[in-house]
Amino acid sequence: ETPRMGRSIHIAQNLMLVTYANPEAKPQGTVQMWDLANEKAPVLIATKEIACSPLSGIIAPSQPYFTVGCVGGGIYMGKNPKNTPDAPFTMDFVRAYGYEHRALYFYESGAKTYLLGFPTDIDTQDSVDETLDDKQTYVVATDTITDVPNGIPDGFELTAAARRRWHLAAP
């Protein structure tokens, strides 16, 4: 059973991080960490109230870290998510950005762990697909543009800058 207004769920290391907004729309939220060693009987190992409305949360793939991003741009960093007596669960406010980070990602390289945050402007998000036109074709052999569609949206091939990025779209 979960409270109303669940925001995010992330699973790693047999742990599940769950974030909730306040059901009364107050600017505070809740973070829960669950032990999934026995998936049929998850165990709640920590609950923490935070002074923001959480938007997203993730657990590092192998390191003892997790993070929560908030509406308004706050970032909380947690450590020791398994909450053992010798390594208690901690969570601290580390940064206030002026914008939300809906997408958060831990990158681990050797002994270092990096947190990457990808900002989004939640107010301008919508579900409408971008409309792309295909009315012309760039002909490499003659370095010209013809008025014939070729199945590639014009924005991806009609400028020199777009053509320089073709290798990024190659499989």
Image (spheres, rainbow, N blue to C red):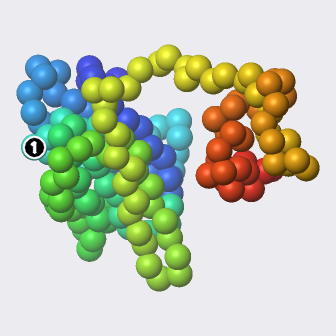
Image spot of residue 81 (x, y percent): 33, 59
Counting other residues with Cα less than 10 Å from the Cα at mark 1, is it few (<14), some (14-19), or many (20 or more)? some
* Residue 110 sits above or below residue 16 on the image: below
Number of numbered callouts drawn = 1
Kindly identify the residue that appears in the image at 44 percent across and 79 percent down: 112
Kindly identify the residue that appears in the image at 33 percent across and 26 percent down: 124
Image spot of residue 144 (x, y percent): 80, 42
Image spot of residue 156 (x, y percent): 67, 39
Please indicate whether residue 119 sits to the left or right of residue 99 in the image.
right
Q: Can you see residue 89?
A: yes
Q: Secondary structure at mark 1?
A: loop
Name which quarter of the figure residue 105 lies in.
bottom left
Residues 162 and 111: in front is 162
Please indicate whether residue 134 sits to the left or right of residue 47 in the image.
right
- Which amino acid lies under the numbered mark 1 shown in the image of this protein? Ala
Quadrant for the N terminus, please.
Answer: top left
Q: Can you see residue 32?
A: no
Residues 159 and 61: in front is 159
Name which quarter of the figure residue 42 lies in.
top left
Residues 89 and 40: in front is 89
* Residue 57 sits above or below residue 123 on the image: below
Kindly identify the residue that appears in the image at 17 percent across and 21 percent down: 23
* Residue 139 sits above or below residue 128 on the image: below
Image spot of residue 88 (x, y percent): 23, 65
Please indicate whether residue 52 sits to the left or right of residue 110 in the image.
left
The residue that disc 1 covers is 51
Kindly identify the residue that appears in the image at 63 percent across and 24 percent down: 132
- Residue at the limit of the structure toward the right, as seen here: 141
- Residue at the limit of the structure toward the bottom, as seen here: 111
